[in-house]
């Protein structure tokens, strides 16, 4: 899972050899997790390292050695060179586990006949390399110009901005997905809906939302987190939530939490700007939280 940070030792090994611009930094990266499994003997006779989208495509095609440029990023793939980097050898990564990496949307096989029959689909249907849910969500918004940005308000807070050049800053939790000849720069914060649900149920939030007054800020300087640890815009595995003082009124506390998450979002875009992202053209909100007018 995105919030599984057990592979801290392996992340340190990656940090010792991976360049700053790699997307494989951090204990939650796919590469750190693969090393964790490999070093603890869980790999066994496994033949492929696959992401969720790879596994689904592999089941459809009966061919599991394929991934895409976006999912492979955090496994160590270099999207600029479009190749697996040589520094992976220093970590003892088994070459035979690494998939062939394709541009998202590239058809690589027809559907397995037996699977096609079970699903009622023609066997001539093609199976294509996928992408991450975040990149797919960005594309679905119609954002297509440098400076366009998408904030996904869900269990976590994810920001992505379209840029003409890749931006990587592992020490700040920033990485870039390739999108054709452009790039999606951004990162994911652990702040978001999960932090809200520690204090209020969905029904309680629905009840409190009409009482929120965005034009009258609470002045509370919160940084809501569901548990210690943050990825972006502050990369600190031990960062503690800041949610005090706690007002007596639930509506004021709830508003303070929303303001805190909005502040995390603003800090995220400021970090991207400092690292060279173009001027923000527009920000589109998506995800479950986007339905809450007070949040957006």
Image (cartoon, rainbow, N blue to C red):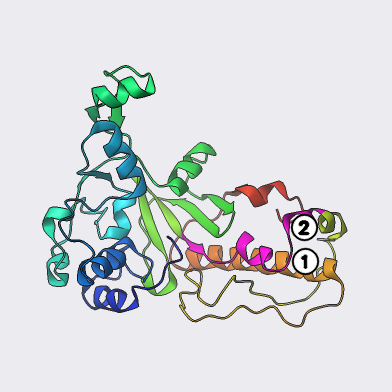
Figure quadrant of residue 35: bottom left
Q: How many marks?
A: 2
Q: Which region of the structure is painted magenta?
A: 187-206
Q: Is residue 187 above or below residue 243?
A: above
- The residue under the point 38% across, 73% down is 6
Disc 1 is placed on an element classified as helix
Q: Quadrant of the N terminus?
A: bottom left
Disc 2 is placed on an element classified as helix
Q: Is residue 10 above or below residue 102?
A: below
Figure quadrant of residue 118: top left
Instruction: Give the Cα distance between marks 1 and 2.
Output: 8 Å
- The residue under the point 46% across, 74% down is 235
Q: Is residue 55 in sight in this rendering?
A: yes
The x, y position of residue 83, in whole percent, is 18, 52
Q: Is residue 125 above or below residue 84?
A: above
- In front: label 1 or label 2: 2
The x, y position of residue 70, in whole percent, is 34, 49
Q: Is residue 60 left or right of residue 196?
A: left
The residue at which mark 2 appears reads as 205
The x, y position of residue 180, in whole percent, is 33, 41
The x, y position of residue 185, in whole percent, is 43, 56
Q: Is residue 264 left or right of residue 159?
A: right
Q: Residues within 10 Å of mark 2 (few under 14, many from 20)?
A: some
The disc label shown at residue 30, or none: none
- The residue under the point 27% across, 50% down is 50
Q: Are marks 1 and 2 in contact (CB under 8 Å)?
A: yes
Q: Earlier in the sequence, mark 1 or mark 2?
A: 2
The residue at which mark 1 appears reads as 254
- The residue under the point 72% across, 68% down is 199
């Amino acid at each position: 899972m995105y919030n599984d940070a057990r592979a801290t030792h392996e992340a340190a090994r990656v940090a010792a050899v991976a360049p700053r611009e790699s997307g494989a930094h951090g204990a939650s990266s796919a590469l750190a997790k693969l090393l964790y499994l490999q070093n603890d003997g869980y790999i066994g006779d496994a033949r492929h390292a696959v992401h969720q989208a790879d596994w689904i495509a592999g089941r459809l095609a009966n061919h599991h050695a394929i991934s895409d440029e976006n999912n492979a990023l955090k496994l160590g793939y270099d999207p600029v060179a479009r190749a697996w980097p040589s520094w992976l050898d220093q970590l003892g990564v088994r070459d035979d586990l690494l998939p062939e990496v394709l541009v998202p949307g590239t058809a690589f096989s027809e559907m397995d006949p037996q699977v096609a029959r079970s699903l009622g689909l023609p066997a001539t249907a093609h199976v294509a390399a996928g992408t991450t849910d975040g990149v797919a969500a960005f594309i679905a918004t119609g954002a297509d110009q440098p400076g366009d940005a998408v904030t996904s308000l869900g269990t976590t807070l994810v920001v992505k901005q379209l840029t003409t050049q890749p931006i990587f800053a592992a020490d700040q939790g920033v990485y870039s997905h390739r999108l054709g000849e452009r790039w999606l720069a951004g990162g994911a914060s652990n702040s978001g809906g999960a932090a809200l649900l520690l204090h209020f149920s969905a029904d309680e939030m629905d009840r409190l939302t009409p009482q929120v007054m965005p034009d009258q800020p609470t002045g509370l300087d919160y940084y809501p987190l569901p548990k210690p640890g943050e990825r972006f815009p502050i990369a600190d595995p031990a960062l503690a939530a800041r949610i005090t003082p706690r007002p007596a009124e639930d509506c004021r506390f709830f508003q303070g939490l929303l303001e805190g998450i909005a502040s995390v979002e603003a800090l995220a875009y400021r970090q991207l700007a400092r690292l060279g992202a173009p001027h923000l053209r527009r920000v589109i909100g998506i995800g479950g939280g986007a339905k809450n007018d007070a949040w957006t």
